[in-house]
Amino acid sequence: MSQWESLRERVLACKGCELAATRTNVVFGVGNPQAKVLLIGEGPGEQEDLRGEPFVGRAGQLLDKMLLAAGFSRESNVYIANMVKCRPPGNRDPNPQEVAACIGYLREQTKLIAPRYIVCLGRVAAQAIIDPGFKVTQQHGQFIQKAGIWLMGTYHPAALLRNPNNKPDGFDDFCKLRDRLAAEAD
Ligand code: URA
């Protein structure tokens, strides 16, 4: 069995925090594990819990639309995962214990994918991965390099559904990413 498959099996069987008791499905992640771009959300919502796939609800449909318009898709050139792999009841933020219990899996995924870029979708992921004081409205679209990986935070698609005025800025962040990848390929 590949390292990726054995990781998936461990994650699907995980009972490392109390979210295991209320989940329907573990949401391991989706996309191309060889992609240069890893997108990281917060945690599964209701639809994701039911389907076992990240970003399949309304926010996910918006994400897919923006990705496609910028030349990305979960079927081809990105991988999508979450900070926590099981749904926090009522869509609350995952608590620090839940994040601590789960983050090792995301680290293992990141090691195996070895992405060139990590895009944090929303405050929870950006504060955990980029900077504990990260402010999405002020710092979205900025690229900083850590341990050889470029990190960028942008609006969570659910936040864009609540605040459509920010959609152009959010989309622009994905266009910047596209342009950087294109420049590197030259
Ligand atoms: N929101 C997230 O952060 N992740 C999902 O998978 C779905 C909604």
Image (cartoon, helix red, strand yellow):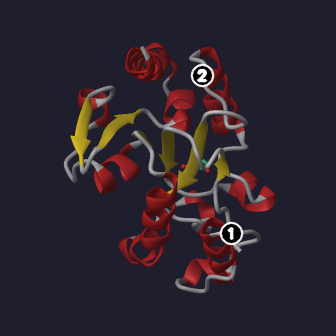
The image shows residue 164 at horizontal and vertical percentages of 52, 20
* 10 Å crowding of disc 2: few (<14), some (14-19), many (20+): many
Figure quadrant of the C terminus = top left
Residue 143 vs 114, above or below: the answer is: above
Residue 61 vs 92, above or below: the answer is: above
Name the residue at 60% across, 86% down: 15
Q: Amino acid at mark 1?
A: Glu
| Circle 1: element type | helix
Residue 90 vs 69, above or below: the answer is: below
| Residue under pointer 2 | 66
The image shows residue 166 at horizontal and vertical percentages of 44, 20
Name the residue at 53% across, 30% down: 162
Furthest toward the front, the residue is 186
Name the residue at 72% across, 42% down: 57
Residue 4 vs 140, above or below: the answer is: below
The image shows residue 100 at horizontal and vertical percentages of 38, 75
| Residue under pointer 1 | 5
> Mark 1 and mark 2 in contact (Cβ < 8 Å)?
no
Figure quadrant of the N terminus = bottom right
- Residue 121 visible in the snapshot: no
Eye-nearest disc, 2 or 1: 1
Name the residue at 46% across, 65% down: 94
